[in-house]
């Protein structure tokens, strides 16, 4: 089976999430910022703020000159990872192999999955529409390798679906940064006039290694599919559960209360041994007519 990977780039991950919680922010330019060397520096901009000419890395004082009405919000450095982890669990409906790509992306191994949506085009379209309905605006691409999917997702302008064995053609017009290399390496490439991958992709590998180091070669070979790249999938936490089989249907409130107490006793015993607490639980009751009824149980004690 040919391997296929999807790269997803959340261009405004944290600001999109904030707009979901505070819809009034959608119409105004706002940015996230953190202190750096005695100055407040923008770490992420909203879609409206970007249209006003603001960008990550810009000094807040300069941003206020360009856009006086900009709203500045203190950033949370741990928020991106938390959001991506939650999103990766949600994405298991599309593939069992989802990896977080910090600071603002996900990588999906979709080998053997896309046919369930009839085509890769329909698969990507469904993802985009679902994320849009959640308030996230993304770029997305699919290819045989993680490197090519990532490069096209971030820097491609023509198409999002790269056919099998067409990595070379997809990469040729893209800048060196598309290979996920360090800034210092891409800067040296540009200084030498090597502004696209096509300008050095056919150079002798020994010359590239000597001049630019091992990372450039590794990323190039991974993108082309000549070297394997292993992604680390997120493994969802298995929920705690207890099951109480009954030979005869429970028909009285007293019987249900006794059954619930037995389930909670068993569950709490397990949690106590592991030093954990319970805040939220779901009780599912399976009726004789095959219908399932459930109620939520919450507690104020951890």
Image: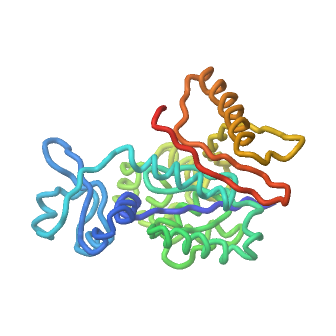
Answer with left or right where residue 190 lies relative to residue 49.
right
Residue plotted at (32% across, 47% down): 76
Estimate the x, y position of residue 208 in percent, counting from the top left.
51, 50
Residue plotted at (45% across, 67% down): 136
Which residue is more in the foreground, 35 or 271? 271
Which residue is more in the foreground, 21 or 235? 21
Q: Quadrant of residue 110?
A: bottom right
Residue plotted at (50% across, 64% down): 197
Which residue is more in the foreground, 186 or 152? 152
- Is any part of residue 79 visible from this angle? yes
Q: Quadrant of residue 159?
A: bottom right
Residue plotted at (12% across, 64% down): 64
Residue 120's place in the image compared with 83, above or below, is below
Q: Quadrant of the N terminus?
A: bottom right
Q: Quadrant of residue 53?
A: bottom left
Answer with left or right where residue 34 lies relative to residue 108.
left
Estimate the x, y position of residue 49 in percent, counting from the top left.
26, 69
Estimate the x, y position of residue 18 in percent, counting from the top left.
35, 60
């Amino acid at each position: 089976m040919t391997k296929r990977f999807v790269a997803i780039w959340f261009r405004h991950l944290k600001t999109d999430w904030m707009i979901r919680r505070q819809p009034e922010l959608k119409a105004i330019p706002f940015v996230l910022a953190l202190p750096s060397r005695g100055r407040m520096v923008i770490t992420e901009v909203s879609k409206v703020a970007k249209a006003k000419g603001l960008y990550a890395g810009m000094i807040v004082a300069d941003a206020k000159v360009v856009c006086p009405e900009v709203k500045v919000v203190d950033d949370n450095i741990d928020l991106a990872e938390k959001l991506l982890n939650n999103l990766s669990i949600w994405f298991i409906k599309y593939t069992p192999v989802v990896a977080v790509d910090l600071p603002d992306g996900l990588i999906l191994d979709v080998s053997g999955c896309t046919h369930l949506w009839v085509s890769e085009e329909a698969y990507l379209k469904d993802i985009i529409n679902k994320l849009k309905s959640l308030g996230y605006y993304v770029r997305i691409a699919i290819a045989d390798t993680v490197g090519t999917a990532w490069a096209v997702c971030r820097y491609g302008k023509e198409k999002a679906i790269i056919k099998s064995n067409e990595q070379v053609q997809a990469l040729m017009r893209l800048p060196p940064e598309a290979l996920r290399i360090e800034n210092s390496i891409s800067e040296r490439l540009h200084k030498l006039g090597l502004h696209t991958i096509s300008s050095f992709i056919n150079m002798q590998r020994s010359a590239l290694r000597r001049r630019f180091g091992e990372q450039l070669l590794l990323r190039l070979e991974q993108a082309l599919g000549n070297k394997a790249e292993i992604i680390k999938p997120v493994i969802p936490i298995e929920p705690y559960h207890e099951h109480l089989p009954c030979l005869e249907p429970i028909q009285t409130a007293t019987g249900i209360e006794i059954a619930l107490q037995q389930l909670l006793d068993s569950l709490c015993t397990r949690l106590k041994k592991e030093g954990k607490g319970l805040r939220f639980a779901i009780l599912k009751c399976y009726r004789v007519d095959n219908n399932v009824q459930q109620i939520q149980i919450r507690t104020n004690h951890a």
